[in-house]
Amino acid sequence: LDYLLLLSEGRLVNLGNATGHPSRIMDGSFANQVLAQMHLFEAKFADLAADERDAHISVTVLPKALDEEVARYMVEGFGGIITRMTEAQAAYLGVSVNGPYKADGYRY
């Protein structure tokens, strides 16, 4: 082939076309992926003996605390203000003042 197909005027196709995700949404997705990788690294799967690895292979959901960390940074990045939950509010909801604010089984 001696030609080049240029899509979306050279911009990222996902962001340059009408059906793409906005960059702010992509930022959150990428941040969650980085935190998930850090979480997996800290679990030290690679350090397990070869015969132990099979028992630890799984598909898991990102812990809510990490997901909420990304959400907090995104709100702050947009200039939003996050207020701290009171003890009474936390007790009413049955959560810790510091989160996570949803059970791990909750799906957004």
Image: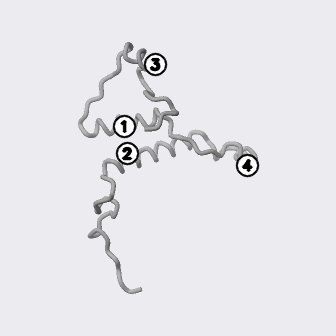
Element marked by disc 2: helix
Q: Which residue is mark 2?
A: 28
Relative height, residue 27 to residue 18 (above, below): above
Kindly identify the amino acid type of the residue bearing the numbered disc 3. Answer: Gly
Marks 4 and 3, how far apart at CA: 41 Å
Q: Nearer the viewer, mark 3 or mark 2?
A: 3
Considering only order in the chain, which callout, 2 or 4, is on the residue closer to the N terminus? 2
Q: Label 3: state its secondary structure.
A: loop
Marked residue nearer the N-terminal end (4 or 3): 4
Kind of residue at badge 1: Ala
- The circle on residue 71 is 1
Residue at 29 percent across and 65 percent down: it is 11
Task: Look at the numbered discs 1 and 2 and tell me whether their residues touch, using CB distance below 8 Å.
Answer: yes
Q: Are marks 4 and 2 in contact (CB under 8 Å)?
A: no
- Locate residue 66 relative to residue 11 in the image: left or right: right
Q: Cα distance, mark 1 to mark 4?
A: 36 Å
Residue positioned 46% across, 19% down in the render? 94
Q: Nearer the viewer, residue 26 or 102?
A: 102
Q: Nearer the viewer, mark 4 or mark 3?
A: 3
Mark 1 is surrounded, within 10 Å at the Cα level, by few (under 14), some (14 to 19) or many (20 or more) other residues, namely: some
Choose the circle earlier in sequence order: 1 or 2. 2
Instruction: Check if mark 1's residue and mark 4's residue have beta carbons within 8 Å.
Output: no
C-alpha gap between disc 3 and disc 2: 27 Å
Q: Secondary structure at mark 1?
A: helix
Query: CB of mark 1 within 8 Å of CB of mark 3?
Result: no
Residues 21 and 33: in front is 21
Q: From the viewer's perspective, is 87 left or right of 49?
A: left
Residue type of the residue flagged with mark 2: Gly
